[in-house]
Image: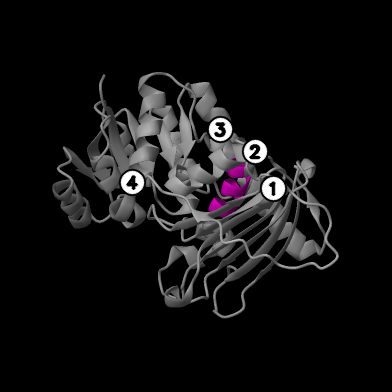
Amino acid sequence: MSKLRFGIIGAGGIADRRTIPGMMLASNVEVTAVMEINPLHAEALREKYNAKYAYTDAAQLLANPEIDAVYIASPVVCHAPQAMMAAAYGKHILLEKPVAMNIAEGEKLLAYCEKQGVKVAAGFMMRFGSHVMNMKRSVQEGKLGQVVSGYSQFTLWCPKEEGNWRQVKAKSGGGCLMDMGVHCIDLMEYIIGSRVCEVGAFNDTVCFDYDVEDSSTVILKMKNGAQCVIQTNFNIPDEVSKWRLELFGTRGRLLGDTIIGQNDGGKLNAAFLDNVVGYSATQNHADMEGEFLPGDFGNMYTREVESFADSVLNNLPLEVPASDALHVQKIIDAAYRSTTEHRFIAIEEY
């Protein structure tokens, strides 16, 4: 088998805007079938991507022997049930985040996939961004020295809208933290190379009348001692937003401007010190300009699906296993608990 034959469950939304176009550019992937509840929409997507089959029911798609793997981009409440159904049919799974509505459901899903012998990866496509990879490489090479501080801000203008499942906790599991913070937390761990051990947070619905948070600030303590802040919002207009990912260490800094999101781009400013001088009582701020690192920009979704397909076709370890996403979900659960219990939560409690 030279190409992994994909079925897409929930082929509208992010799948239609980003992931399927990325698949169309992949060298080792073929889009065989699409599934959407609306039959007219399903057929339109089949024609758009020249897929062989269109379905309105996930079980019908999964029963097709010409499909090797599925990409699931349905509302969060459907993730675990549909993924377990896919595993029952022996299909490998690329699953959008979060992988389940809660930790118990996620653990049940991963255990079942292991039992069925199928691979299940999480849709953390931002790991494949050019400047994210630059940041990870710089940290691994020791250019920042010891990483001591991190900050990320990721926002979306999301006023109340009838029928928007992201604004309904029973369908989404949470608001801006669950939808956007999940990426930022994963990137902090992935780039720094250390796990979160303690969490504190404020999660509030400040502007809009829905039952998920529209404002979130999360404080993370990493096992290596680094302290990080993650801010996500559903209430900042896109025109004034600034998506940031920043790291500071004992020998340097990395300032990422719009390097996160659904497009591979932005600017990454780096400042690295060969020698760190001793204490200065003058405390003058040198304001080192640093340099802008070049980016090998491409399609993050193409890189994501090619990596997943390579793991399946050649029986290699997954670059982004769903277990990583479930770990991040434990951090998010701790952040929600921190808000309600007014205390810091240790991840070892899970």
Magenta span contains residue 184: yes
Residue corresponding to mark 3: 110
Residue depicted at x 28% and y 53%:
16
Q: Earlier in the sequence, mark 2 or mark 4?
A: 2
For badge 4, the amino acid type reads: Gly
Between disc 2 and disc 4, the foreground one is 2
Relative to 163, 49 lies left or right: left
Magenta span contains residue 29: no
Let me know if residue 173 appears in the view. Answer: no
Residue corresponding to mark 4: 298
For badge 2, the amino acid type reads: Gly
- Marks 1 and 2 close (CB-CB < 8 Å): yes
Q: Could you tell me residue 3's position as x and y percent?
A: 26, 26
Residue corresponding to mark 2: 142
**Distance Cα–Cα, label 1 vs label 2:** 9 Å
Let me know if residue 236 appears in the view. Answer: yes
Residue depicted at x 58% and y 38%:
324
Q: Earlier in the sequence, mark 4 or mark 1?
A: 1
**Distance Cα–Cα, label 4 vs label 3:** 31 Å
Q: Earlier in the sequence, mark 3 or mark 2?
A: 3
Judged from the image, the secondary structure of the residue bearing numbered disc 2 is loop
Between disc 3 and disc 2, the foreground one is 2
Classified by dominant secondary structure, the portion drawn in magenta counts as helix
Q: Could you tell me residue 160's position as x and y percent?
A: 47, 76
Name the disc covering residue 251, or none: 1
Judged from the image, the secondary structure of the residue bearing numbered disc 1 is loop
Which residue is more in the foreground, 103 or 4? Answer: 4
- Residue 140, quarter of picture: top right
For badge 3, the amino acid type reads: Leu
The magenta span reads 182-191
